[in-house]
Image (cartoon, rainbow, N blue to C red):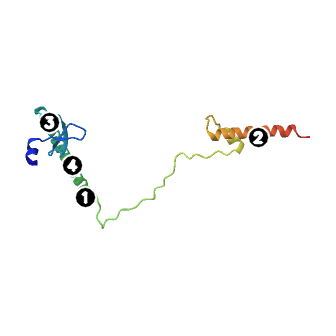
């Protein structure tokens, strides 16, 4: 009885509504309007199958070309390798040195701290400005209160 139903209705009901047709040749599902595809839907399945076959053929050709190139490269590598009894002279070791080496400038701590300006409103810059202000205030009071 189930087999008879499968022959009569090729589409399957989807949980959210509508029908889906499974094409086993392409291993994919298509949305259809009813339990059986219309001739227009069947034509679109066939067109998609042609595109699917063309893509598979291109992949097979590409894989064959890649394999052929790999075999050629491997054969060329084997032919270029020297035999075990030949000796390849080694040259002097290669020395690699950087072109532009930046030497850090020497200077006092005060000059470096003044050179660093804090224009943004980050916590570290704000804290630095705040602590400098507190030191100035206490420094002014210390000078005023001296006998």
Q: Within 10 Å of the Cα at label 1, are there few (<14), some (14-19), or many (20+) other Cα atoms? A: few
- The reply to whether dot 2 and dot 4 touch (C-beta < 8 Å) is no
Q: Gap between marks 4 and 1, in whole Å?
A: 24 Å
- The reply to whether dot 3 and dot 1 touch (C-beta < 8 Å) is no
Q: Gap between marks 2 and 4, in whole Å?
A: 75 Å
Q: Which residue is rendered at x = 18% and y = 47% of the image?
A: 60
- Comparing 84 with 16, the one in front is 16
- Residue 108 appears in view: no
Q: Which residue is mark 4?
A: 63
Q: Is residue 5 left or right of residue 29?
A: left
| Among the 4 quarters of the image, the one containing residue 113 | top right
Q: Which of the two discs, 2 and 1, labels the residue nearer the N terminus?
A: 1
Q: Which residue is rendered at x = 8% and y = 44% of the image?
A: 7
- Nearest to the eye among marks 4 and 1: give it: 4
Judged from this view, the residue extending furthest toward the right is 147
- Nearest to the eye among marks 3 and 4: give it: 3
Q: Which residue is mark 2?
A: 135
Q: Gap between marks 2 and 3, in whole Å?
A: 82 Å
Q: Which residue is mark 1?
A: 79
Judged from this view, the residue extending furthest toward the top is 40
Q: Which residue is mark 3?
A: 47
- Comparing 109 with 54, the one in front is 54
Where residue 95 appears, as percent x and y from the top left, is 48, 55
Q: Gap between marks 3 and 4, in whole Å?
A: 25 Å
Q: Which of the two discs, 4 and 1, labels the residue nearer the N terminus?
A: 4
Q: Is residue 135 left or right of residue 64?
A: right
Where residue 34 appears, as percent x and y from the top left, is 15, 35
Q: Which residue is rendered at x = 81% and y = 40% of the image?
A: 139
Where residue 133 appears, as percent x and y from the top left, is 74, 37
- Comparing 65 with 95, the one in front is 65
Query: Secondary structure under badge 4?
Result: helix
């Amino acid at each position: 009885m189930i087999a008879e139903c499968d022959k009569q209705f090729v589409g399957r009901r989807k949980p959210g509504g509508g029908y889906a047709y499974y094409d086993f040749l392409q291993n994919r599902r298509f949305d259809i309007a009813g339990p059986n595809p219309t001739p227009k839907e069947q034509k679109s399945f066939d067109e998609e199958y042609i595109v699917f076959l063309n893509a598979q053929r291109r992949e097979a050709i590409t894989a064959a070309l890649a394999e052929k190139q790999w075999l050629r490269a491997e054969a060329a590598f084997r032919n270029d390798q020297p035999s075990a009894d030949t000796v390849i002279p080694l040259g002097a070791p290669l020395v690699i040195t950087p072109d532009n080496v930046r030497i850090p400038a020497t200077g006092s701590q005060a000059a470096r701290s003044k050179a660093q300006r804090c224009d943004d409103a980050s916590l570290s810059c704000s804290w630095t400005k705040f602590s400098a202000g507190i030191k100035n205030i206490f420094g002014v009071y210390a000078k005023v209160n001296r006998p």
